[in-house]
Image (cartoon, rainbow, N blue to C red):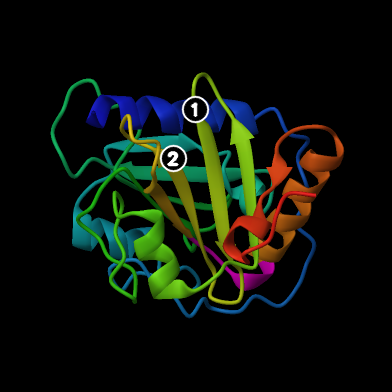
Amino acid sequence: MAVQRRWLIGILALLLGIAVAQAAEQTKLTTPAESLGGLRPGTLTVDQLNTKLGKPDVAGAGGLLQLYGGGTDSKLYGWFMTKNPSYTVPDIAVETAKDSNRVDLLMVIGYDGIKTEKGITCFQSEDDLVKAYGKPDFAFSVPMQGYVLTEVYYPKLGISFDLAPLDATGGRSIVAMYITYPEYLARAILLRQKYIKDGVGEDVTYRYSGGKET
């Protein structure tokens, strides 16, 4: 099951990677209210993570920062917290701007060893998430190879979640968590809305508001 979860995230990265890069305009950035295990972008550096987690297991060019409202050039650093030779996506990963040591995006992917401020971890249910955070401001759903992945956004808190079915029941669970600046997440939502206009994915925010698809 864990390998399946990693495979799902890998497909997500490939799918979203086809998007046209969105340049990050200069703007005031607000330190997010949320954190993952007390870690939050804006007040965190890669050096601090090296002290806490050790040398990164993965380091190289990024790519997800631009999909979460940041710049097109970024660096990625990742740490494997569980040992499995088939894992290719790190449990904890961060991205920085090209020539910066400051963490601008923090990700926990398929790893339940880190909690949000409200005590949410990967693999908890969609119901657990909504009970903790309430209805999201925006939700985006995109089909994959046999799966449908849903991104759920709380931009004011600077946090978003990836949800996907992990078993035959079809119920959605958290497979990844992301923390970045509220301003970046607002731009990420605009990017998803562009995807929808281009025929990729759909707005499923109505699911969380008791509404129906229109």
| Numbered-mark total | 2
Q: 37 left or right of 200?
A: left
Q: Is residue 134 in the magenta section?
A: no
Is any part of residue 88 visible from this angle? no
Give the residue pinned by disc 1: 147
Q: 124 left or right of 54?
A: right
The kind of residue tagged 2 is Ala
**Residue 120: x, y in percent?**
31, 65
**Residue 56: x, y in percent?**
28, 44
Near-viewer residue (195 or 38): 195
Q: 135 left or right of 108?
A: right
Near-viewer residue (77 or 180): 180
Give the residue pinned by disc 2: 164
**Above or below: residue 171 compared with residue 104:** above
**Above or below: residue 3 compared with residue 44:** above
The kind of residue tagged 1 is Tyr
- Magenta region, residue range: 179-183
Q: Secondary structure at mark 1?
A: loop
Q: Residue at x 70, y 65 (%)?
A: 186
Near-viewer residue (70 or 168): 168
Q: Secondary structure at mark 2?
A: strand
Disc 2 to disc 1, C-alpha distance: 7 Å
**Residue 70: x, y in percent?**
66, 55
Is any part of residue 112 visible from this angle? yes
Whether pointer 2 and pointer 1 mark residues with C-beta atoms closer than 8 Å, the reply is yes
